[in-house]
Image (spheres, rainbow, N blue to C red):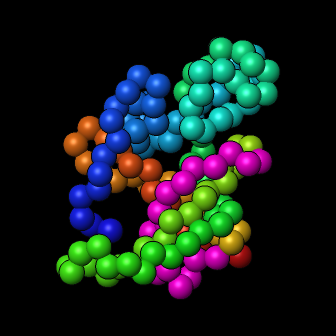
Amino acid sequence: MSSPRKLPELVPETAFFWTSGRDGVLSIQRCGSCGHWQHPPLPRCPACHCADLAPQPVSGRGRVATFTVNHQAWSREEDPRFVFAAIELAEQAELYVFSNVLCDPGKVHGGMAVAVTFEQQDDVWIPLFVPVQAHG
């Protein structure tokens, strides 16, 4: 997907998520009281209702929980197929980031191990995911 994306507005509540890729790190909001990770960011922790929340780096690794493949041609210049997936991050069960998986859509499957990479556009670093090759 090489065409320019519609970029998110950098508002105080979510700017850290869209700019942490500048350092090559994915950051997710975490509760300082109970340690619960949450995404998207919220004003209070859904686990303990505390407001002691701050962005913290995560490993950037996860697995494809579910996905869909787009087949709609949005422009004539590009292959219309791309993968949009719910990525469950390794740090916590049911901690999801919704993004694209950058690979042949026919090779994506549920449970597939992925790692974050970033695409910079202006002041935004968009988190995208690539397959992680199994060692063995």
Tell me which residue sits at (46%, 81%) in the image: 104
In this figure, what is the number of numbered marks? 0
| Pick the front one: 43 or 30 | 43
Q: Where is residue 106 in the image (x, y as percent from the top left)?
A: 53, 85
Q: Quadrant of residue 50?
A: top right
Q: In which quarter of the image is residue 2?
A: bottom left
Tell me which residue sits at (60%, 59%) in the image: 86
| Pick the front one: 43 or 120 | 43
Placement of the C terminus among the 4 image quadrants: bottom right
| Pick the front one: 16 or 61 | 16
Tell me which residue sits at (57%, 50%) in the image: 97
Whether residue 134 appears in this view of the structure is: no
Whether residue 48 appears in this view of the structure is: yes
Q: Is residue 74 above or below residue 60?
A: below
- Would residue 130 be counted in the magenta stretch? no
Tell me which residue sits at (57%, 38%) in the image: 40
Magenta segment: 93-109
Q: Is residue 71 above or below residue 5?
A: below
Q: Position of residue 87 (x, y in %)?
A: 61, 57
Farthest residue toward the bottom?
106
Q: Where is residue 103 in the image (x, y as percent from the top left)?
A: 46, 75
- Would residue 94 be counted in the magenta stretch? yes
Placement of the N terminus among the 4 image quadrants: bottom left
Is residue 123 found left or right of 115 in the rendered image?
Answer: left
